[in-house]
Amino acid sequence: MLTVQGLRSGYGHGLVLFDIDLTVEPGSIVAVLGRNGAGKTTLLHTIQGLIRPTAGSVTWEGRELVGLPSHKVARAGVALVPQGRRVFAPLSVEDNLRVRVSSGAWTTDRIWELFPSLAARRAIRAGALSGGEQQMLALARALLTSPQLLLMDEPSEGLAPAVVDHLSDIILELRQTGLAVVLVEQNLGVALDIADRVAVMVRGRMMHRSTPDELRADPVLVNQLLGAA
Ligand SMILES: Nc1ncnc2c1ncn2[C@@H]1O[C@H](COP(=O)(O)OP(=O)(O)OP(=O)(O)O)[C@@H](O)[C@H]1O
Ligand SMILES: [Mg+2]
């Protein structure tokens, strides 16, 4: 289980996250929603150890992660799929996957099984893949560290609806294997469809937590939290 308590974080002297609390049960998907600039990426980067918080704690399976460098957070079973995919465009699909192979449960063979379209394009330059395939590749790279907790930063951004549906199915399939997921999204539909719990950030604060159905049932609240400014 992931427990974030009283987390404050930011850049230099500027605070971006104010006393964030969040829990994620094993094998569950928690969607974190929020407008542009709400602090979603900052939250994921702080959990992953890329940014050091000024206060608060992040525990995973009872272990304090605050203060650990990001490679140790990764070794503890937490993997980030970064916003904007960040694959190595000049390298082939296969070489992108050679970057971080671990000795855990995930092997490249298992990746090819989960993503047949990547298997078919394994020799192609990652930069020549479609946006959806690049997202799958970014996810594959994270899976090869054999994580128990996946931090996904706006995976549906810029993808066509059919591709988003496919990606949602894959995330649900991963949850079936026991993986916990923090899914940062601006796509409310995706979040409400696949998450077990939803949390909404507004200007660096966690302003709402509920089940997807509770949020769906309150369009006025949705508009207040996420509507156009
Ligand atoms: N490297 C940085 N240095 C200074 N300020 C930053 C940096 N990265 C983000 N910020 C600021 O922190 C705040 C939160 O940004 P963050 O990227 O976490 O938001 P977000 O919710 O992920 O937004 P988006 O939906 O656009 O990805 C914003 O005001 C942003 O300008
Ligand atoms: Mg972001």
Image (cartoon, rainbow, N blue to C red):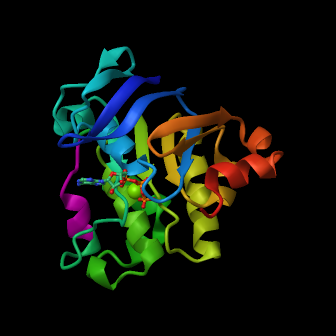
Residue 75 location, x and y as percent? 23, 33
Residue at point 53%, 35% (across, down): 206
Residue 208 location, x and y as percent? 63, 36
Q: Quadrant of the C terminus?
A: bottom right
**Side of 198 where 116 appears, left or right:** left
Residue 73 location, x and y as percent? 25, 33
Residue 220 seen in this snapshot: yes
Residue at point 41%, 53% (across, down): 110
- Note whether 37 is above or below 120 in the view shown: above
Residue at point 31%, 56% (across, down): 141
State which quadrant residue 139 falls in. Answer: bottom left
Residue at point 78%, 38% (across, down): 214
Residue 106 seen in this snapshot: no
**Side of 219 where 114 appears, left or right:** left
Magenta part of the chain: 94-102
Residue 193 location, x and y as percent? 71, 52
Does residue 33 belong to the magenta stretch? no
Which residue is at the far top? 62
Q: Decide which of 203, 154 is in the foreground and name it.
A: 203
- Note whether 84 is above or below 151 in the view shown: below
Which residue is at the far bottom? 128
Does residue 98 belong to the magenta stretch? yes
Q: Quadrant of ligand 2?
A: bottom left
**Number of marks in the rendered image:** 0
**Side of 119 where 132 appears, left or right:** right
- Note whether 58 is above or below 202 in the view shown: above
- Note whether 30 is above or below 157 in the view shown: above
